[in-house]
């Protein structure tokens, strides 16, 4: 079965954030991710990983003012210095946490910014981040997020747009972050899509649709999907990024003994 990781921004929220690492390890996860580490000291997070024998598999670059509704600043031409400072901050945390993959949230395009300007800003910022990351042996991931339900106006809302960006940036360390939930909404045909996109896929996340809850609550056949991910030879992490429909422990039925990694 795939190497599963737990997204601690969504799972085990019954306890404080720093306690979720132990909960993830006890549940059988070997890797964790979360949206952002920046509210916590680097050494605190590094210790939580070490104490629980966990791998930090991914986190996002600073997104701007998340609480105010911003969802990334990479496409905003008036935020270039802030974006570059965020790249440096992301690298500092990646070093401390031993994380080799960071995701760049492209952002929502304001009406005041043309599509061409937003796209060129995104290209330039991704190229800048990719070069900085390459010196640290870090892969830069780009996620397509659905614009129908969760993030109307998100500039990268299909895998095709992410591939176009990857082609334009033309850097060896830029990859697609493929989220099954978002792509089921925007594109469907998940297994065949992943097979075609595999050379560019750097990370996989999942939740069922509709509802963004655990596998088995919606329309996606996760048994087939997980089996296909294995059979196509994907060797990266597959992260549970869903909102449990109840208590987290009761949502882990999909995480059978056969799916659990070795301690």
Image: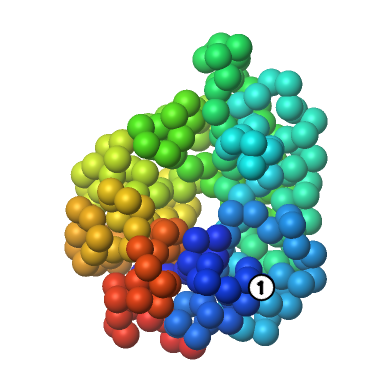
> 134 and 63: which one is in front?
63
Q: Give how far across and how far down residue 57 sits, in percent.
A: 56, 64
Observer-nearest of 248 and 166: 248
Is 160 placed above or below 202 here? above
Residue drawn at (41%, 59%), measured in percent from left and top? 242
Q: Indicate whether 29 appears above or below 126.
A: below
User: For this rendering, which residue is in front, 185 or 248?
Assistant: 248
| Residue 107: x %, y % from top left | 57, 32
Whether residue 43 sits left or right of residue 29 in the image: it is: right
Position of residue 67 in the picture relative to residue 195 (left or right): right
Tell me the residue at 46%/35% (across/down). 151
Q: Residue 112's x, y, as percent?
A: 60, 12
Badge 1 marks a residue whose secondary structure is helix
- Outermost residue toward the bottom in this view: 263
Visible residue check, residue 259:
yes
Classify residue 247 by image quadrant: bottom left
Instruction: Indicate the quadrant where residue 32 lies.
Output: bottom right
Q: Is residue 178 left or right of residue 49?
A: left
- Looking at the rendering, in which quadrant would you find the N terminus? bottom left
Residue in the image at 36% along x and 44% along y: 182
Which residue corresponds to mark 1?
A: 18
């Amino acid at each position: 079965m795939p190497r599963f990781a737990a997204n601690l921004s969504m799972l085990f929220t019954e306890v404080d954030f720093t306690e979720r690492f132990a909960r993830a390890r006890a549940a059988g996860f070997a890797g964790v991710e979360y949206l952002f580490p920046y509210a916590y000291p680097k050494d605190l997070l590094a210790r939580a990983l070490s104490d629980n024998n966990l791998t930090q598999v991914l986190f996002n670059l600073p997104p701007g003012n998340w609480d105010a509704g911003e969802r990334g600043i990479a496409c905003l031409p008036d935020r270039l210095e802030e974006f570059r400072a965020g790249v440096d901050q992301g690298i500092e945390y990646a070093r401390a946490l031993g994380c080799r993959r960071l995701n760049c949230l492209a952002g929502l395009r304001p009406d005041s910014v043309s599509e061409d300007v937003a796209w060129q800003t995104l290209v330039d910022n991704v190229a800048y981040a990719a070069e900085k990351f390459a010196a640290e042996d870090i892969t830069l991931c780009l996620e397509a997020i659905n614009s129908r339900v969760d993030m109307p106006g998100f500039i990268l809302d299909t895998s095709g747009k992410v591939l176009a960006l990857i082609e334009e940036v033309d850097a060896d360390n830029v990859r697609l972050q493929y989220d099954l939930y978002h792509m089921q909404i925007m594109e469907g045909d998940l297994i065949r899509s992943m097979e075609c996109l595999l050379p560019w896929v750097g990370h996989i996340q999942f939740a069922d649709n509709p509802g963004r809850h655990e596998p088995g609550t919606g329309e996606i056949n996760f048994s087939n999907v997980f089996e296909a991910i294995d059979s196509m030879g994907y060797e990266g992490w597959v992260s549970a990024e869903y909102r449990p429909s109840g208590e987290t422990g009761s949502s882990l039925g999909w995480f059978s003994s056969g799916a659990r990694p070795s301690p």
